Amino acid sequence: MSGTSPRAILVTGAGGQLGTELQRCAWPQGYEIVAIDHDTLDLRDAGAIAAMVASRPIAAVINGAAYTAVDKAESDVVTAWAVNAMAPAAFGEACAKAGIPLVQVSTDYVFAGDRQGAWEVNDPVAPLGVYGASKLGGELAVRTSGARHAIVRTAWVVSAHGHNFIKTMLRLAETRDTLSVVADQYGAPTSAADLANVLMRITLRLVEDEDAPTGTFHFSNAGAISWADFATEIFRQSALRGGPSTMVVPIPSSDYPTPAARPANSRLSHNAIHAAYGIAPRDWQVALSDILDELIGATK
Ligand SMILES: NC(=O)C1=CN([C@@H]2O[C@H](COP(=O)(O)OP(=O)(O)OC[C@H]3O[C@@H](n4cnc5c(N)ncnc54)[C@H](O)[C@@H]3O)[C@@H](O)[C@H]2O)C=CC1
């Protein structure tokens, strides 16, 4: 690409789990990642979003930022909707105007989680709380914006950075002999690094191929477990590395009340993303191992 300027991909949520991994991805030569966060652009400001997209040539937007404080959202409805619904609406409008694709990240929380099996992309949505409802608002805004788009729903995002279940478990294990963990909510963890790679692949296709598949897709790592199972495996693999470990006591969600209700079943089907993009996730245990390698070190 010598002599031509690189194609810029605007990434929001630069300091978050996903944004961090998107910056670590092996983007092909000729691409430049413009990763932004609060300090550059407050997503509550729709006008600033429009100005940002119009301010320079951009090849695509990946909107990975979100108001992710699920419990806090229950009492901070306006901010949750501003960041999770109005900002995607502004990106949708701006991307449609600029004629560039938009990749929007969404969540299993758009589903009620009230039946067995893995959720397909067209299954009925029925969010249980403000976070899920506001993310669904974002999906609808993007879908109707006129921008060429991919909406990628994910769940249980974990990585070596930021706030997530793995880091919380390891921290608590340092000081506790036992740990009570919810055993009646099911899903599959998603490595932020694996998700970032998938979003990179989709974004590159959308930029380079006008006929690339658009619409709604699901991505998580492969498997189906409860949070208690997840914690048990974290401690098993951590102990192998000489890291913190403790005993997991499985409890029902009713013993761990939270302001926001969570879906009991968060399993996401990979049928759509496999059919459209040939993407098949690796097992969650293998992804967990990579994260623990980074957090604790390789197996002793
Ligand atoms: N963390 C999880 O378990 C799940 C996350 N998701 C979705 O995946 C995506 C990525 O999540 P994570 O990386 O885990 O989130 P995170 O909480 O680690 O990062 C969120 C990012 O959004 C930015 N942000 C929030 N409000 C902003 C504002 N007003 N202006 C500018 N930036 C703002 C934060 O500064 C941060 O960089 C999000 O869209 C989230 O809704 C979906 C399902 C589960």
Image (tube, rainbow, N blue to C red):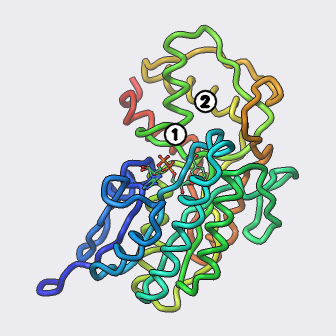
Q: Which residue is mark 2?
A: 233
Residue sitting at 71 percent across and 58 percent down? 133
Q: CA distance from mark 2 to mark 1?
A: 9 Å
- Of the 4 image quadrants, the one containing the C terminus is top left
- The answer to which image quadrant residue 260 occupies is top right
- Of the 4 image quadrants, the one containing the N terminus is bottom left
Residue sitting at 77 percent across and 41 percent down? 261
Which residue is most to the left?
A: 3
Checking the image for residue 21, the label placed there is: none
Q: Which residue is mark 1?
A: 288
The location of residue 114, given as percent across then percent down, is 86, 50
Q: Earlier in the sequence, mark 2 or mark 1?
A: 2
Q: Is mark 2 within 8 Å of ligand 1?
A: no
Task: Determine whether, in the image, residue 229 is placed left or right of residue 33.
Answer: right
Q: In the rendered view, would you say 70 is above or below 104?
A: above
Q: Residues within 10 Å of mark 1 (few under 14, many from 20)?
A: many
Q: Mark 2–mark 1 contact, CB under 8 Å? A: yes
The location of residue 276, given as percent across then percent down, is 61, 78
